[in-house]
Amino acid sequence: MDYHRGGGGVVVDDGTLFAGGADGVVRAFAPSSSDGGPRRACSASASAHAGAIQCLAASAASPVGGGGEDDGGGAMVATGSMDQTLVTHVLLRRRGAGDGEEEDGATATTTTTMGLHAVYSGGHANSVSSVAFSGDGRTMASGDWDGGLSLWSVPSASPSNLAEEDDVVDDDVNPKKKKKKKRRGGVDGAAAARDDGDGDGIREVKPLASVRAHSSNVSGLAWGHDSPTTLITGSWDHGLRVYDTNRMDCVLTLNGSRVVSALGRCSNSNVVATGSPDCTVRLWDMRTNGGGGGSNGGMDKSLRQSHKAWVSSVRWSPTDPFVLASTSHDGTLKVWDIRSYLPLHTVNAVNSKKSGEKALCLAFGDGVIFTGGSDCVVKQFSCNI
């Protein structure tokens, strides 16, 4: 699968893989078969931004209802960009009759597109570097390169009021073939959709709250386990913090000795893993005792320095709280059991024929791990642990 260099990938409950790239395009990949076989083609895409996508998050708990038996909304994806914009799109699936619809027994076909859902403005004055949905998909947090943190209420919508985006056609596939129209991304894209008269349902959302959470880039966000008002942040200022989003107060601060370049939370606790430019994955206990802002948090341990370059992404297994994976600018994917200091598996996540290619992001699927890198390819690895 082609992958355009950029900001991340995530798999939602229905098996859809979302990937964002430096071309500002967000793409959705669906399994090629019901048995979870290799993903061969992009099922939908949208030109979301004028700049590179820096971060991506998706929610299967989309606040978008179906418009009937033949018209439904799917998962929602949020993307933040270097152009300082933050938008959400919804995966739309529409059923239609097959080629032989006049004949009895015609097979219905499903068309998948991506609709622009909302534009989030007024929260950031620099590149949006991290984004995360709450568990119910109704609240979203985002961080930027200045250390700013914003909270947003995700609006509901009907599929009929979403601005559908044309699939992106790569310019070098067939230069003589007529290209499909590309929408402009971000705030400009929403304005264009409204001007065309096909985006009446698109909303411009203002933040619920905005604070200066860190003194430098907010590189990672994670909502707390079983706590809809707990938000964990990591930053290039070497710090990790826990915020109570009801008051937007910091209730716990932990300071390390290295930049936090990646952050992921365990599936069943507030233990988080972080990556750093010093090639190390570290574990942190971010639990708070809930009394007067006190805490019992702290760094648990560092895993063996196994990567050879900047750790670019850290993700926990959604099914096993002892297993996590990391990617690095050394081009590798490593799978860890946190009960051991050494990685269980190490594989090359990028094109081995090209030197200097970097592994940039990863996502867990059902028994598989996906990686994306600077070689513009999404790879799928079997992961049976």
Image: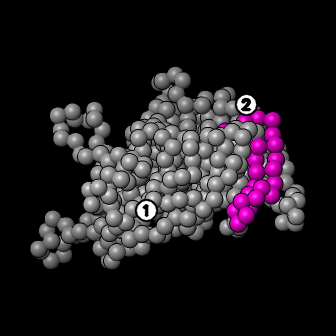
In this rendered view, identify the residue nearer to me: 163 or 261.
Answer: 163
Per the picture, the main secondary structure of the magenta-coloured stretch is strand
Residue 166 is situated, as x and y percent measured from the top left of the image, at 29, 51
Residue drawn at the location 56% of the way across and 41% of the way down: 126
Residue that carries the numbered disc 2 in the rendered image: 278
Q: Is residue 228 left or right of residue 97?
A: right
Q: Which mark is residue 360?
A: none
The part of the chain drawn in magenta is 239-266
Quadrant of residue 261 within the rendered picture: top right
Q: Is residue 102 left or right of residue 314?
A: left
Q: From this viewpoint, is residue 345 visible?
A: no
* Mark before the other along the chain sequence, 1 or 2: 1
Residue 353 is situated, as x and y percent measured from the top left of the image, at 47, 24
Residue that carries the numbered disc 1 in the rendered image: 203
Q: From this viewpoint, is residue 244 visible?
A: yes
Residue 150 part of the magenta segment: no
Residue 248 is situated, as x and y percent measured from the top left of the image, at 71, 60
Q: Residue furthest left?
A: 102
In this rendered view, identify the residue nearer to me: 64 or 104.
Answer: 64
SS at mark 1 in the image? strand
Q: Is residue 244 left or right of residue 90?
A: right
Q: Is residue 346 left or right of residue 182?
A: right
Residue drawn at the location 55% of the way across and 31% of the way down: 358
Residue type at mark 1: give it. Answer: Arg
Quadrant of residue 292 within the rendered picture: bottom right
Colour option used: one colour
Residue drawn at the location 71% of the way across and 54% of the way down: 232
